[in-house]
Amino acid sequence: MGLLDGKVAIVTGAGHGIGRGHALELARHGAKVIVNDLGVSVTGEGGGRDADLTVDIIKERGGEAAGNYENVADFEGAGRMVQQAIDEFGRLDILVNNAGIVRDSTIVKMSEADFDAVFNVHVKGTWAPAKHAATYWTDKFKETGVPVGGRIINTTSGAGLTGNFGQTNYASAKAAIASMTQTLSLELYKAGVTVNCVGPAAATRITGTMPGAPKVIEADDVPLDEWNRMDPAVSSPLVAWLASDEADHVTGQVIRAVAENIILMKPWSDGPTINNGQKRWDATKLGTQLATDVFFTRAPGLRY
Protein backbone atom coordinates (compact mmCIF):
# COMPACT_ATOMS: atom_id res chain seq x y z
CA MET A 1 0.00 0.00 0.00
CA GLY A 2 1.61 3.25 -1.15
CA LEU A 3 1.57 6.44 0.85
CA LEU A 4 -0.40 8.16 -1.92
CA ASP A 5 -2.38 5.30 -3.47
CA GLY A 6 -5.56 6.57 -5.09
CA LYS A 7 -4.44 10.20 -5.04
CA VAL A 8 -4.25 12.48 -8.08
CA ALA A 9 -1.61 15.19 -8.18
CA ILE A 10 -0.58 18.13 -10.32
CA VAL A 11 3.05 19.26 -10.27
CA THR A 12 3.83 22.47 -12.14
CA GLY A 13 7.20 23.13 -13.71
CA ALA A 14 7.90 19.40 -13.58
CA GLY A 15 9.73 18.89 -16.87
CA HIS A 16 13.10 19.25 -15.17
CA GLY A 17 14.82 19.75 -11.85
CA ILE A 18 12.97 19.97 -8.55
CA GLY A 19 9.55 19.64 -10.17
CA ARG A 20 10.59 16.42 -11.91
CA GLY A 21 11.87 15.12 -8.57
CA HIS A 22 8.50 15.85 -6.94
CA ALA A 23 6.53 14.22 -9.77
CA LEU A 24 8.67 11.08 -9.68
CA GLU A 25 8.39 10.84 -5.89
CA LEU A 26 4.62 11.29 -5.84
CA ALA A 27 4.25 8.65 -8.54
CA ARG A 28 6.59 6.30 -6.68
CA HIS A 29 4.21 6.42 -3.72
CA GLY A 30 1.17 5.65 -5.85
CA ALA A 31 -0.19 9.00 -7.05
CA LYS A 32 -1.37 9.59 -10.60
CA VAL A 33 0.38 12.74 -11.80
CA ILE A 34 -0.39 15.56 -14.21
CA VAL A 35 3.07 16.77 -15.18
CA ASN A 36 2.90 20.44 -16.15
CA ASP A 37 5.65 22.28 -17.96
CA LEU A 38 5.55 25.07 -20.51
CA GLY A 39 8.92 23.95 -21.87
CA VAL A 40 10.57 27.35 -21.66
CA SER A 41 14.14 28.29 -20.79
CA VAL A 42 15.08 29.33 -17.25
CA THR A 43 14.42 32.93 -18.29
CA GLY A 44 10.93 32.07 -19.59
CA GLU A 45 11.64 32.07 -23.31
CA GLY A 46 10.79 29.54 -25.99
CA GLY A 47 8.51 26.59 -25.46
CA GLY A 48 8.34 22.83 -25.85
CA ARG A 49 7.02 19.55 -24.50
CA ASP A 50 9.51 19.00 -21.69
CA ALA A 51 6.70 17.60 -19.54
CA ASP A 52 6.76 14.49 -21.71
CA LEU A 53 10.28 13.68 -20.52
CA THR A 54 9.04 13.28 -16.96
CA VAL A 55 5.85 11.51 -18.04
CA ASP A 56 7.91 8.93 -19.90
CA ILE A 57 10.08 8.22 -16.86
CA ILE A 58 7.02 7.76 -14.63
CA LYS A 59 5.44 5.36 -17.13
CA GLU A 60 8.69 3.43 -17.57
CA ARG A 61 8.70 2.91 -13.80
CA GLY A 62 5.14 1.59 -13.82
CA GLY A 63 3.29 4.75 -12.79
CA GLU A 64 0.49 6.75 -14.34
CA ALA A 65 1.00 10.26 -15.65
CA ALA A 66 -0.08 12.70 -18.34
CA GLY A 67 1.57 15.82 -19.70
CA ASN A 68 0.19 19.33 -19.51
CA TYR A 69 1.68 22.28 -21.38
CA GLU A 70 -0.32 25.23 -20.04
CA ASN A 71 1.13 28.52 -18.81
CA VAL A 72 0.23 28.42 -15.11
CA ALA A 73 0.32 32.23 -14.93
CA ASP A 74 -2.54 32.33 -17.44
CA PHE A 75 -5.76 32.12 -15.43
CA GLU A 76 -7.72 30.18 -18.03
CA GLY A 77 -4.77 27.91 -18.71
CA ALA A 78 -4.45 27.09 -15.01
CA GLY A 79 -8.14 26.21 -14.99
CA ARG A 80 -7.72 23.88 -17.95
CA MET A 81 -4.85 22.16 -16.14
CA VAL A 82 -6.96 21.48 -13.06
CA GLN A 83 -9.82 20.27 -15.24
CA GLN A 84 -7.46 17.89 -17.07
CA ALA A 85 -6.65 16.15 -13.79
CA ILE A 86 -10.36 15.71 -13.08
CA ASP A 87 -11.17 14.57 -16.62
CA GLU A 88 -8.27 12.12 -16.99
CA PHE A 89 -8.02 10.71 -13.49
CA GLY A 90 -11.42 11.48 -11.97
CA ARG A 91 -10.38 13.84 -9.18
CA LEU A 92 -7.72 16.16 -7.78
CA ASP A 93 -6.12 15.70 -4.36
CA ILE A 94 -2.72 17.38 -4.52
CA LEU A 95 -1.41 20.57 -6.13
CA VAL A 96 2.34 21.21 -6.05
CA ASN A 97 3.13 24.72 -7.31
CA ASN A 98 6.73 24.64 -8.44
CA ALA A 99 7.00 26.48 -11.77
CA GLY A 100 9.44 29.36 -11.89
CA ILE A 101 11.95 31.36 -13.91
CA VAL A 102 14.79 33.75 -13.12
CA ARG A 103 16.01 36.98 -14.68
CA ASP A 104 18.70 38.10 -12.28
CA SER A 105 20.31 41.53 -12.07
CA THR A 106 20.67 44.32 -9.56
CA ILE A 107 17.78 46.73 -9.28
CA VAL A 108 19.68 49.44 -11.16
CA LYS A 109 20.04 47.17 -14.19
CA MET A 110 16.76 45.26 -13.91
CA SER A 111 14.09 46.14 -16.45
CA GLU A 112 10.42 46.44 -15.62
CA ALA A 113 9.76 43.55 -18.00
CA ASP A 114 12.19 41.31 -16.11
CA PHE A 115 10.55 42.15 -12.79
CA ASP A 116 7.04 41.57 -14.14
CA ALA A 117 7.92 38.31 -15.88
CA VAL A 118 9.44 36.70 -12.79
CA PHE A 119 6.71 37.93 -10.45
CA ASN A 120 4.02 36.78 -12.85
CA VAL A 121 5.28 33.21 -13.21
CA HIS A 122 6.00 32.68 -9.52
CA VAL A 123 3.19 34.58 -7.81
CA LYS A 124 0.30 34.49 -10.27
CA GLY A 125 1.52 31.06 -11.37
CA THR A 126 0.98 29.89 -7.79
CA TRP A 127 -2.24 31.80 -7.17
CA ALA A 128 -4.08 30.83 -10.37
CA PRO A 129 -3.77 27.02 -9.99
CA ALA A 130 -4.51 27.36 -6.26
CA LYS A 131 -7.64 29.40 -7.06
CA HIS A 132 -9.00 26.73 -9.41
CA ALA A 133 -8.08 23.85 -7.11
CA ALA A 134 -9.56 25.63 -4.09
CA THR A 135 -12.81 26.26 -5.98
CA TYR A 136 -13.05 22.56 -6.89
CA TRP A 137 -12.42 21.47 -3.31
CA THR A 138 -14.68 24.00 -1.59
CA ASP A 139 -17.52 23.13 -3.99
CA LYS A 140 -17.12 19.47 -2.98
CA PHE A 141 -17.10 20.45 0.68
CA LYS A 142 -20.29 22.49 0.27
CA GLU A 143 -22.01 19.53 -1.42
CA THR A 144 -21.04 16.91 1.15
CA GLY A 145 -20.13 18.77 4.34
CA VAL A 146 -17.14 16.43 4.62
CA PRO A 147 -13.57 17.83 4.72
CA VAL A 148 -12.02 17.02 1.35
CA GLY A 149 -8.40 16.37 2.35
CA GLY A 150 -6.92 18.53 -0.40
CA ARG A 151 -3.25 19.49 -0.37
CA ILE A 152 -1.48 22.56 -1.75
CA ILE A 153 2.30 22.61 -1.52
CA ASN A 154 3.96 25.80 -2.69
CA THR A 155 7.62 26.56 -3.35
CA THR A 156 9.72 29.28 -1.78
CA SER A 157 13.51 29.63 -1.55
CA GLY A 158 16.27 30.93 0.65
CA ALA A 159 16.28 34.09 -1.47
CA GLY A 160 12.67 34.76 -0.53
CA LEU A 161 13.23 34.09 3.15
CA THR A 162 16.55 35.85 3.75
CA GLY A 163 17.21 37.86 0.56
CA ASN A 164 19.83 37.45 -2.14
CA PHE A 165 21.92 40.01 -4.05
CA GLY A 166 20.75 40.58 -7.61
CA GLN A 167 17.36 38.94 -7.18
CA THR A 168 14.86 41.60 -6.13
CA ASN A 169 12.27 40.14 -8.51
CA TYR A 170 12.82 36.48 -7.59
CA ALA A 171 13.29 37.07 -3.86
CA SER A 172 10.20 39.25 -3.50
CA ALA A 173 8.14 36.72 -5.49
CA LYS A 174 9.29 33.85 -3.28
CA ALA A 175 8.54 35.88 -0.14
CA ALA A 176 5.06 36.58 -1.51
CA ILE A 177 4.49 32.85 -1.99
CA ALA A 178 5.38 32.17 1.65
CA SER A 179 2.88 34.81 2.76
CA MET A 180 0.26 33.50 0.34
CA THR A 181 0.71 30.05 1.86
CA GLN A 182 -0.08 31.28 5.35
CA THR A 183 -3.18 33.16 4.20
CA LEU A 184 -4.53 30.30 2.08
CA SER A 185 -4.07 27.91 4.99
CA LEU A 186 -6.48 30.06 7.01
CA GLU A 187 -9.02 30.40 4.21
CA LEU A 188 -9.13 26.70 3.27
CA TYR A 189 -8.84 25.10 6.71
CA LYS A 190 -12.58 24.59 7.16
CA ALA A 191 -12.82 22.65 3.90
CA GLY A 192 -10.07 20.30 5.05
CA VAL A 193 -7.38 21.62 2.70
CA THR A 194 -3.86 22.04 4.03
CA VAL A 195 -1.48 24.57 2.48
CA ASN A 196 2.25 24.43 3.13
CA CYS A 197 5.40 25.79 1.52
CA VAL A 198 8.71 24.04 0.91
CA GLY A 199 12.03 25.78 0.33
CA PRO A 200 14.40 23.41 -1.49
CA ALA A 201 18.05 23.80 -2.46
CA ALA A 202 19.54 21.87 -5.38
CA ALA A 203 21.70 21.99 -8.48
CA THR A 204 19.07 22.91 -11.07
CA ARG A 205 18.90 24.84 -14.32
CA ILE A 206 18.00 27.92 -12.28
CA THR A 207 20.95 27.72 -9.89
CA GLY A 208 23.13 26.85 -12.88
CA THR A 209 22.79 30.46 -14.09
CA MET A 210 24.71 31.73 -11.05
CA PRO A 211 28.50 32.27 -11.05
CA GLY A 212 30.36 29.31 -9.55
CA ALA A 213 27.24 27.14 -9.39
CA PRO A 214 27.60 23.35 -9.25
CA LYS A 215 26.87 21.22 -12.31
CA VAL A 216 23.17 20.90 -13.09
CA ILE A 217 21.66 17.56 -12.06
CA GLU A 218 18.35 16.00 -13.06
CA ALA A 219 16.36 14.13 -10.43
CA ASP A 220 16.52 10.84 -12.34
CA ASP A 221 20.33 11.08 -12.55
CA VAL A 222 20.66 10.09 -8.88
CA PRO A 223 19.63 6.53 -7.91
CA LEU A 224 17.40 6.24 -4.85
CA ASP A 225 20.12 4.39 -2.94
CA GLU A 226 22.74 7.08 -3.56
CA TRP A 227 23.20 10.40 -1.72
CA ASN A 228 23.93 13.71 -3.41
CA ARG A 229 23.30 16.80 -1.34
CA MET A 230 22.49 18.82 -4.49
CA ASP A 231 20.02 16.26 -5.87
CA PRO A 232 16.90 18.11 -7.12
CA ALA A 233 14.81 15.43 -5.40
CA VAL A 234 16.27 16.07 -1.92
CA SER A 235 13.08 17.88 -0.85
CA SER A 236 10.70 15.50 -2.65
CA PRO A 237 10.15 13.04 0.25
CA LEU A 238 9.00 16.00 2.36
CA VAL A 239 6.60 17.04 -0.39
CA ALA A 240 5.24 13.49 -0.65
CA TRP A 241 4.67 13.34 3.11
CA LEU A 242 2.96 16.74 3.19
CA ALA A 243 0.73 15.49 0.37
CA SER A 244 -0.30 12.41 2.35
CA ASP A 245 -3.12 11.82 4.82
CA GLU A 246 -0.50 11.55 7.58
CA ALA A 247 0.10 15.31 7.31
CA ASP A 248 -3.51 16.42 7.78
CA HIS A 249 -2.54 18.27 10.99
CA VAL A 250 0.16 20.38 9.31
CA THR A 251 -0.84 23.60 7.55
CA GLY A 252 0.41 27.15 7.10
CA GLN A 253 4.03 26.08 7.54
CA VAL A 254 7.16 27.11 5.66
CA ILE A 255 9.74 24.32 5.71
CA ARG A 256 13.20 24.34 4.14
CA ALA A 257 14.79 21.14 2.88
CA VAL A 258 18.50 21.72 2.37
CA ALA A 259 20.78 18.69 1.87
CA GLU A 260 20.18 16.38 4.86
CA ASN A 261 18.42 19.09 6.89
CA ILE A 262 14.70 19.79 7.25
CA ILE A 263 14.21 23.20 8.85
CA LEU A 264 10.93 24.64 10.13
CA MET A 265 11.05 28.36 9.47
CA LYS A 266 9.77 30.76 12.10
CA PRO A 267 7.22 33.27 10.81
CA TRP A 268 7.50 37.01 11.30
CA SER A 269 7.06 37.66 15.01
CA ASP A 270 7.32 40.59 17.42
CA GLY A 271 10.80 41.40 18.62
CA PRO A 272 12.08 43.99 21.11
CA THR A 273 9.47 46.71 21.65
CA ILE A 274 9.54 50.22 23.08
CA ASN A 275 6.50 52.13 24.32
CA ASN A 276 6.22 55.89 24.61
CA GLY A 277 3.30 56.01 27.04
CA GLN A 278 0.66 57.46 24.71
CA LYS A 279 2.91 60.30 23.61
CA ARG A 280 4.09 61.20 20.12
CA TRP A 281 7.60 60.00 19.37
CA ASP A 282 10.32 62.64 19.16
CA ALA A 283 12.49 61.92 16.11
CA THR A 284 15.48 63.68 17.70
CA LYS A 285 15.43 61.24 20.64
CA LEU A 286 14.21 58.14 18.83
CA GLY A 287 17.65 57.10 17.58
CA THR A 288 18.99 56.81 21.11
CA GLN A 289 15.94 54.90 22.34
CA LEU A 290 16.13 52.44 19.45
CA ALA A 291 19.88 51.96 19.83
CA THR A 292 19.50 51.27 23.55
CA ASP A 293 16.34 49.14 23.74
CA VAL A 294 15.74 47.69 20.24
CA PHE A 295 19.01 47.29 18.34
CA PHE A 296 21.15 47.09 21.53
CA THR A 297 24.00 49.02 19.92
CA ARG A 298 24.25 51.52 22.80
CA ALA A 299 24.91 50.62 26.40
CA PRO A 300 21.99 51.30 28.79
CA GLY A 301 24.26 53.48 30.91
CA LEU A 302 24.54 55.86 27.95
CA ARG A 303 20.80 56.13 27.56
CA TYR A 304 20.58 59.96 27.34
Image (cartoon, helix red, strand yellow):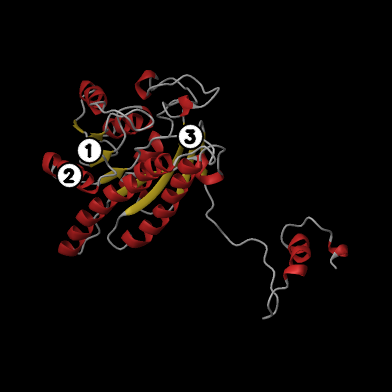
Determine the CA span between mark 2 and mark 3.
31 Å
Q: Which mark is residue 104?
A: 3
* Front position among marks 2 and 3: 3
Residue labelled with disc 1? 70
Q: Image quadrant of residue 115?
A: top left
Mark 1 touches mark 2? (CB < 8 Å)? yes
Q: What's the distance in space between the residues labelled 1 and 3, CA to CA?
A: 24 Å
Q: Residue at x 36, y 48 (%)?
A: 247
Residue 250 in sight here? no
For the point 54% across and 40% down, which residue is it? 108
Q: Is residue 271 above or below residue 279?
A: above
Identify residue type, mark 2. Answer: Arg
Going by the picture, which residue comes out furthest to the bottom?
Answer: 278
Question: Residue 286 appears at what percent x and percent y?
Answer: 74, 67
Which quarter of the figure is the N terminus placed in?
top left
| Dot in front, 1 or 3 | 3
* Residue kind at label 3, given as amino acid type: Asp
User: Which of disc 3 and disc 2 is earlier in sequence?
Assistant: 2
Q: How far apart are marks 1 and 2 (CA)?
A: 8 Å
Where residue 90 sits: x, y (%)? 13, 44
Q: Can residue 125 be seen in this view?
A: yes
Where is the C terminus found, in terms of image quarters?
bottom right
Q: In this view, does 193 lie above or below 63?
A: below
Q: What number is the disc on residue 119?
A: none
Disc 1 crowd, CA 10 A, few/some/many (<14, 14-19, 20+): some
Q: Earlier in the sequence, mark 1 or mark 2?
A: 1
Label drawn at residue 80: 2
Lower sequence index among marks 1 and 3 = 1
Figure label count: 3
